[in-house]
Image (spheres, helix red, strand yellow):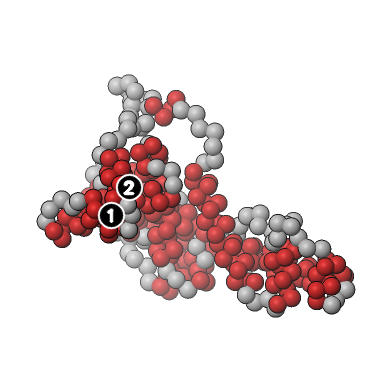
């Protein structure tokens, strides 16, 4: 996919992407269907380039984290392309409404990788506070025309004052950037000498989103089942300790074979809901 090259000057890049018109609802739907059904890469490219301006707007929200804006934009563009790949045009909403989640996720993931986890914290609440703190401080300062106190910020974010003070200290005392060049030639950085054996963060992010989508589809499918089918789904197919077919048959006054037949039908329906989400998440038995 040939996206416009990001120039050293942000203004030039913005002027380039603004040449691409925003698509109408009908245009977007037709292009998304073409890509979804025929893998038309030209259609996918048009979907991407028509939404690049929104990536720039979102990236500006993260410009105060000590990371280059153009780097944030490029990460957001990757998120946009991933969103286009997974977008379902038949869901009834615009691409950008779906893509904004992926754009933010890729940008936030990049920001987090640019900071030490010791500085950010490892829990979900700490990471949320990391992204909310400066934004909230600026909002309060704009309203009161003075630097806000920790207790004011804590009250607005509904957290302890000590948590605000701790995160503020982390934000104001950055670690050495691992992206800094070790030599004047700029060929090697500190991160080149670090070994990471854990799961790739982007893959983990995609896996988490896919799992959530699968669970949502399964819950929607369960709501369509009758009481007997729901019972078999929850107490045999999805249970950590499945009930026996004999016990299920006794509960509903049916034969063991009939219980097995119902289980087969329910499994088929639930697997169809997983296939619809396009995931291979192992939430059901093989």
Q: Earlier in the sequence, mark 1 or mark 2?
A: 1
- Secondary structure of the residue carrying tag 2 is helix
Cβ–Cβ below 8 Å for labels 1 and 2?
yes
Tell me which residue sits at (64%, 62%) in the image: 275
How many numbered marks are there? 2
Q: Which residue is mark 1?
A: 154
Work out whether 63 lies above or below 140. above
Q: Which residue is mark 2?
A: 163
Q: Position of residue 130 (x, y in %)?
A: 34, 48
Tell me which residue sits at (32%, 21%) in the image: 183
Tell me which residue sits at (44%, 63%) in the image: 98
Q: Position of residue 286 (x, y in %)?
A: 74, 56
The answer to whether 165 appears left or right of 96 in the picture is left
Mark 2: few/some/many CA within 10 Å (<14, 14-19, 20+): some
Q: Position of residue 104 (x, y in %)?
A: 39, 54
Tell me which residue sits at (28%, 54%) in the image: 154
The answer to whether 39 appears left or right of 93 in the picture is right
């Amino acid at each position: 996919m040939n996206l416009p090259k990001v120039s050293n000057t942000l203004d030039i890049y913005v002027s380039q992407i603004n040449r691409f018109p925003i698509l109408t609802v009908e245009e977007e739907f037709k292009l998304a269907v073409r890509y979804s059904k025929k893998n038309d890469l030209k259609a996918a490219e048009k979907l991407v380039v028509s939404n690049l301006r929104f990536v720039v707007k979102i990236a500006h929200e993260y410009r105060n984290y000590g990371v280059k804006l153009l780097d944030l934009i490029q990460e957001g563009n990757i998120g946009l392309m991933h969103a286009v790949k997974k977008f379902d045009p038949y869901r009834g909403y615009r691409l950008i409404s779906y893509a904004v989640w992926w754009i933010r996720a890729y940008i936030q993931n990049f920001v987090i990788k640019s900071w030490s986890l010791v500085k950010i914290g490892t829990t979900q609440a700490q990471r949320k506070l990391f992204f909310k703190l400066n934004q909230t401080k600026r909002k309060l300062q704009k309203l009161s025309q003075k630097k806000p106190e920790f207790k004011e910020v804590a009250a607005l974010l509904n957290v302890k004052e000590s948590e605000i003070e701790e995160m503020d200290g982390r934000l104001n005392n950055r670690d050495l950037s691992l992206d800094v060049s070790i030599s004047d030639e700029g060929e090697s950085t500190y991160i080149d000498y670090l070994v990471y054996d854990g799961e790739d963060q982007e893959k983990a992010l995609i896996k988490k989103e896919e799992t959530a989508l699968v669970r949502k589809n399964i819950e929607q499918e369960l709501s369509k089942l009758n009481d007997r089918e729901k019972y078999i789904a929850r107490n045999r197919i999805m249970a950590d300790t499945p009930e026996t077919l004999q016990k299920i048959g006794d509960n509903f006054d049916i034969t063991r074979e009939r219980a097995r037949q119902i289980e087969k039908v329910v499994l088929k329906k639930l697997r169809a809901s997983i296939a619809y989400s396009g995931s291979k998440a192992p939430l059901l038995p093989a």
